[in-house]
Amino acid sequence: MAEKDSAGAGDLPPSIEAAWGLRERPVKGPKPGLSLERIVAAAVAVAASEGIAAVSMGRVAKEVGASTMSLYRYVSAKDELYVLMQEAAIGPPDPLAALAAGAGWREALTEWAAGQREQFLANLWVLRIPIGGPPATPNSLAWWEQGLQALEGSGLSEGDKISVILLISNFVRSEALLMSDLAAAVTARGVSPEEVVAGHERTLRRLVDPVRHPAIHRLLDSGVMSEPDDPDYEFTFGLATLLDGVEALIRSTAAEG
Amino acid sequence: MAEKDSAGAGDLPPSIEAAWGLRERPVKGPKPGLSLERIVAAAVAVAASEGIAAVSMGRVAKEVGASTMSLYRYVSAKDELYVLMQEAAIGPPDPLAALAAGAGWREALTEWAAGQREQFLANLWVLRIPIGGPPATPNSLAWWEQGLQALEGSGLSEGDKISVILLISNFVRSEALLMSDLAAAVTARGVSPEEVVAGHERTLRRLVDPVRHPAIHRLLDSGVMSEPDDPDYEFTFGLATLLDGVEALIRSTAAEG
DNA sequence: CCCCTTCTGCGTATGGCATACGCGTTATTG
DNA sequence: CAATAACGCGTATGCCATACGCAGAAGGGG
């Protein structure tokens, strides 16, 4: 009951194959009136201006001037559309200047992480679409390729390289998601980011019991919550810490290798 | 048009206040036939056995033997139910043995991260529910409290402490999400985890072009994808790297302080 | 003691959603 | 010129969250 198909479980959905440029145009039948590109572009536009929740098959169809069901000739399910949207929004990475300049892995990775973050921040809705498994689209792969290249001179094993890449890209993603949450709260109420943060601090103060939560209480008293307001701070801090950890790994690898 | 309400934007939804034990029972009217606890427990049970997607208001209502709309007397929207489900599933943290034993911050943080991961892995569906903003529920706060306590002796500033806690809990979360993705793929097809990974490697091999993706190509050739199969590996590796970074931060703080 | 207020459970209705299915139509190939 | 295959899309199904309002329960004030 297990091994049946020739290719097996590893096959791609057809629209993803189309994103890779595989898949010959069928030669029979009427010429398609739409195209995957048009559909995905329309979906991205809706998501960018009204959020991912506004992206429905019907809505996208209206945008391209077609009927809902006609989209299913191009995409077999909405999840496929999501994948293609992500792919289109993220785009290919710019070449790493640090690599060209012959700089070290740390500069290269920093640039790589910053680039990825930039793409996320420019397309916050991307962070809201549910991920399923590892990437298999051209641009996603290109980003991974670039990350691996940044670690080329590090002396790490191949396994350690992906692990590091995974670690960093997860960090970038979750930090950007935090920003996105803040942005969402800001637009939900009509207030400024500062007010949102201040409101949350007020709520915490009301709930935190000095006896049961001494550390949080100390934290609130320290006034850190009201301070910095550099939107890049958490990113810069986290990345630096992460890279310090990677540096330790690289050093120890070099020492024992 | 800005400052109107006394409490302002920081207010909690009523069902969350109920989770804190605030909110007096109304004295008029019929006695409630249900309770938040029963509803949340039923929702958690459904999520645990059939996934978060199976949790609908109607389904939960059926589970507790009530009508769909009656749930809205206890919860004002489904998102509130989500928050309460998360709170219930995660539960309060066990006391840190490392802290009691007087061990250092590194042992304490490691234990803390492992505990958090354990809760996630035992309730994979939690990872699928969309997060909105920072936690304001009792158990979530308790976890944060414990994380901060683990860093007590580190000499870090309060601000650096939250940043570190944030960094680590985001890491734990995203790593667990990866496991969850794998588990989902495993149950979706009927195959073993090894076969899923192997299938993905096969797909990659088909798509990766040695010229455009030299680093990934090298990676695939190195055979790392087929190797380890220790499900904790990525977690152990990432956490160690992260903590090495934190160690560097603590050292440099001590040096300049 | 009774009525009025307040809260309960819940039936009904609305408007949204993804998508299965099948039909008429259009191009291409033999 | 027919057979074939892909097209656009109308219709229908079965979910979903949730607004609204009503009928009945419980307690408090007169």
Image: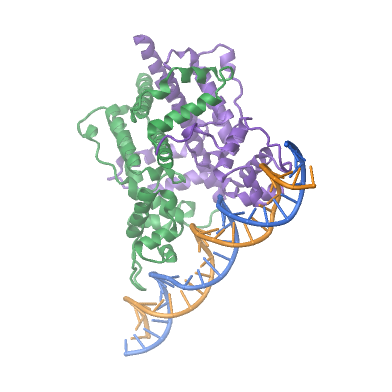
Chain colours: A purple, B green, C blue, D orange
Q: Looking at the image, which is closer to me, A202 or B51?
A: B51
Image spot of residue B43 (x, y percent): 37, 55
From the viewer's perspective, tell me whether residue B244 is left or right of residue B3: left
Would residue A228 be visible to someone looking at this image?
A: no
Residue drawn at 28 percent across, 31 percent down: B108
From the viewer's perspective, tell me whether residue B87 is left or right of residue B102: right
Would residue A184 be visible to someone looking at this image?
A: yes
Image spot of residue B245 (x, y percent): 39, 23
Image spot of residue B42 (x, y percent): 35, 56
Q: Looking at the image, which is closer to me, B179 or B256?
A: B179
Relative height, residue A95 to residue B87 (above, below): above
The part of the image, by quadrant, that contains residue A240 is top left
Relative height, residue B71 to residue B138 (above, below): below
Q: Looking at the image, which is closer to me, B79 or B244?
A: B79
Instruction: Give the number of callouts.
Output: 0
The part of the image, by quadrant, that contains residue B73 is bottom left
Q: In which quarter of the image is the N terminus of chain B?
A: bottom right
From the viewer's perspective, tell me whether residue D26 is left or right of residue B189: left
Q: In which quarter of the image is the C terminus of chain B?
A: top left
Residue drawn at 35 percent across, 52 percent down: B44
Residue drawn at 31 percent across, 46 percent down: B91
Image spot of residue A209 (x, y percent): 31, 47
Q: Which residue lies furthest to the left in this view?
A: B101
Relative height, residue A149 to residue B138 (above, below): above
From the viewer's perspective, tell me whether residue B59 is left or right of residue A211: right
